[in-house]
Image (cartoon, rainbow, N blue to C red):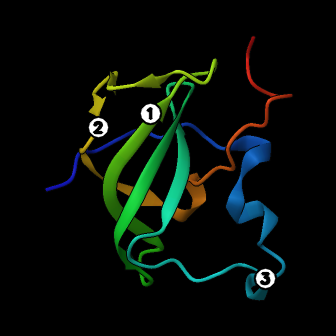
Amino acid sequence: MHKHIDWDEPGNASVSKLFSNDHHAHAKIGHGDILSARYEGIVVRVEVEVYREEEKVSIGNVVALIDGHGQRLKGHGKLVLGDTVRLPDDKRAFEPTADTKER
């Protein structure tokens, strides 16, 4: 069973917004892909087990939790490494670059 997560809104880092006008430029999501999202201000990486096209949602395991300083965490809030989560396409976010990370 997956854990329900209230993902942060991706804002200007939204993957969906970037590819909204050109779906052909964006690769299909599949088993083993690593996707990123934001949760309570940190970056969460999810390894996809299943992508449900009809729901536009990926189901997979949390493989990394990274804070704003680049430190890897074992847990944050109600998430821990290894948790199974649902990640809707509209919550996916590009990871911040060194220029945009908090200092």
Residue 44 picture location, percent across and down: 48, 40
Residue 15 picture location, percent across and down: 70, 60
Image quadrant containing the N terminus: bottom left
Residue occupying the far left of the picture:
1
Disc 1 to disc 2, how far (Cα)?
Answer: 7 Å
Mark 1: amino acid: Leu
Disc 3 to disc 2, how far (Cα)?
Answer: 31 Å
Residue 70: quadrant of the picture: top right
**Residue that badge 3 annotates:** 25
Please report contact status of discs 1 and 2: CB closer than 8 Å, yes or no.
yes
User: How many residues crowd around disc 1 within 10 Å: few (fewer than 14), some, or many (20 or more)?
Assistant: many
Residue occupying the far front of the picture:
71
Image quadrant containing the C terminus: top right
Mark 3: amino acid: Ala
Whether residue 15 sits left or right of residue 44 in the image: it is: right
**Residue that badge 1 annotates:** 65
Picture layout, residue 9 above or below residue 101 = below
Residue 10 picture location, percent across and down: 66, 44
Q: Residue at x 28, y 27 (%)?
A: 78
Picture layout, residue 52 above or below residue 67 = below
Q: Which element type, helix, strand or loop, lies under badge 3?
A: helix
Please report contact status of discs 1 and 3: CB closer than 8 Å, yes or no.
no
Q: State the residue in front, 101 or 77.
A: 101
Mark 2: amino acid: Leu
**Residue that badge 2 annotates:** 81
